[in-house]
Image (cartoon, grey):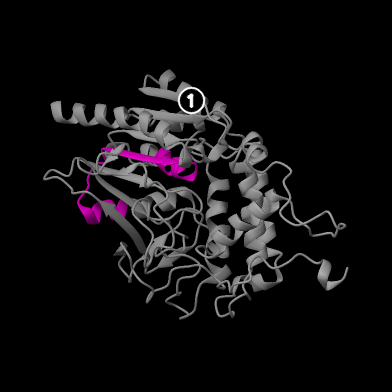
């Protein structure tokens, strides 16, 4: 195949080797909790980390008795910037901005809202792009495996730093919902309510298979360089691997109906003068756009670490199975499904709801009818807000009257 017939670069502009936030970059709205540098943070799967730092953001004011705090947990490629505009330190608008703020579903006139960047992330919390204090170089592929439980333990440390003994609610979708469930099981005494959205109690074979393909795409990129690419020049990072992982994931985040409606068989490149192997339809251009956006704000190694944490998610592990684990949840639960979600189908949230109810717990299960697919928990703002707002108000009222 000639050079002219090969796939064109994702962008004509320079792409950074990593989109990770680094010390010295604009801080934006981030705040940080630094763990004791002389103590190791032990990880569930073995291994440990020294000198862990967690980045977080807050909105609203914590009341006198610290009873109005809500923890919002982000999904795979999210970060602590859940609300607010883009700007220095924040390349994109908050990923749940339509839901968090004064008068919104998560009303910052009433609630103190916190969102942390997860352990293994790349936007201020210790992750593969962070400097290993024992070598003076980025961890790269030497960064250990972390789990959702490890992530939740770092969030508990942030809660302690803020003086929050018990969250009014812990809320999140997809991987964020996994964190929500672990909060309810690991720390039932520290949560008044839980809202796990579009998530599952244990990763399915289908979900693990999708993740495995995405990780393989990254490590097979020759510019991944065994995970040690942080000194690479612009355009010399593992862009095609990370981009391909994002493109494959995007096809699972949106429903077939939505993709077909939005993209159809429209052509992006001219095809009426003959065909070449890399002429693109509109859907291919859309996927390339999604890939480039992620490359500019994310890190390939972090994708590997967090994606693996999602595969390891199983609330029943080491607890005698799913039923026994879910019996530990004592807080009221709101679980939510997107009708066309092919990645985290409705039956997974229904199972969670049924188990909680069978254990004598309080749960409501709502279904949003939308062709958005899994991404609906991020994009169907009005419907998600309509479910969250009364749920949070009810919990707030119970606390006020207790």
* The N terminus - image quarter: bottom right
User: Left or right: where does residue 220 sit relative to residue 328?
Assistant: right
Residue drawn at (67%, 64%) of the image: 240
Which residue, given by chain and number where applicable, does mark 1 sit on?
367
Can residue 301 be seen here? The reply is yes
Task: Judge by depth and name the residue closer to the eye, 253 or 328.
Answer: 253
Q: Please tell me whether residue 163 belongs to the stretch shown in magenta.
A: yes
Question: Image quadrant of residue 53?
Answer: bottom left
| Label 1: which secondary element | strand
Q: Residue furthest front?
A: 272
Question: Image quadrant of residue 116?
Answer: bottom left
Crowding at label 1, few (<14), some or many (≥20) Cα neighbours within 10 Å? some
Q: Please tell me whether residue 351 belongs to the stretch shown in magenta.
A: no
Q: Is residue 63 above or below residue 269?
A: above
Magenta residues (range): 156-181
Q: Is residue 262 above or below residue 142?
A: above
* Residue 199 in the image, given as x and y percentages of width and height: 50, 37
Q: Disc count in the image?
A: 1
User: Left or right: where does residue 62 sit relative to residue 217?
Assistant: left
Residue drawn at (65%, 45%) of the image: 251
Residue drawn at (60%, 70%) of the image: 227
Can residue 402 be seen here? The reply is no
* The C terminus - image quarter: top left
Question: Image quadrant of residue 202?
Answer: top right
């Amino acid at each position: 195949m000639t050079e002219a017939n090969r796939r064109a670069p994702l962008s004509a502009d320079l792409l950074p080797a990593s989109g990770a936030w680094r010390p010295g970059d604009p801080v934006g709205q981030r705040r940080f909790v630094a763990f004791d540098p002389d103590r190791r943070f032990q990880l569930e799967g073995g291994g440990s980390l020294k000198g862990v730092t967690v980045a977080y953001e807050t909105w609203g004011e914590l009341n006198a008795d610290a009873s109005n705090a809500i923890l919002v947990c982000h999904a795979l490629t999210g970060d602590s910037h859940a609300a607010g505009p883009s700007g220095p330190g924040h390349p994109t608008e908050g990923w749940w901005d339509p839901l968090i703020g004064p008068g919104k579903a998560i009303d910052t006139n009433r609630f103190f809202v916190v969102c942390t960047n997860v352990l293994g992330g790349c936007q201020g919390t210790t992750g593969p792009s962070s400097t290993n204090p024992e070598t003076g170089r980025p961890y790269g592929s030497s960064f250990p495996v972390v789990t959702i439980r490890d992530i939740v333990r770092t969030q508990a440390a942030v809660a302690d730093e803020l003086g929050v003994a018990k969250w009014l609610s812990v809320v999140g979708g997809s991987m964020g919902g996994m964190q929500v469930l672990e909060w309810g099981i690991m720390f039932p005494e520290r949560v008044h309510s839980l809202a796990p959205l579009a998530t599952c109690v244990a990763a399915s074979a289908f979900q693990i298979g999708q993740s495995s393909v995405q990780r393989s795409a990254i490590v097979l990129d020759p510019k991944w360089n065994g995970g040690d690419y942080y000194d690479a020049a612009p355009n010399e990072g593992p862009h095609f691997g990370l981009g391909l992982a994002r493109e494959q994931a995007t096809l699972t985040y949106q429903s077939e109906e939505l993709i077909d409606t939005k993209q159809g068989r429209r052509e992006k490149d001219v095809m009426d003068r003959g065909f070449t192997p890399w002429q693109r339809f509109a859907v291919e251009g859309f996927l390339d756009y999604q890939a480039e956006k992620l490359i500019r704000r994310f890190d390939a190694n972090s994708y590997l670490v967090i994606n693996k944490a999602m595969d390891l998610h199983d609330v029943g592990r080491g607890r005698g199975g799913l039923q026994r684990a879910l019996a530990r949840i004592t807080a009221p639960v709101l679980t939510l499904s997107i009708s066309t979600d092919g990645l985290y189908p409705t039956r997974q949230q229904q199972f969670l709801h049924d188990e909680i109810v069978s254990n004598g717990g309080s749960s409501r299960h709502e279904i949003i009818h939308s062709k958005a697919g899994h991404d609906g928990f991020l994009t169907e703002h009005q419907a998600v807000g309509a479910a969250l707002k009364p749920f949070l108000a009810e919990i707030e009222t119970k606390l006020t009257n207790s």
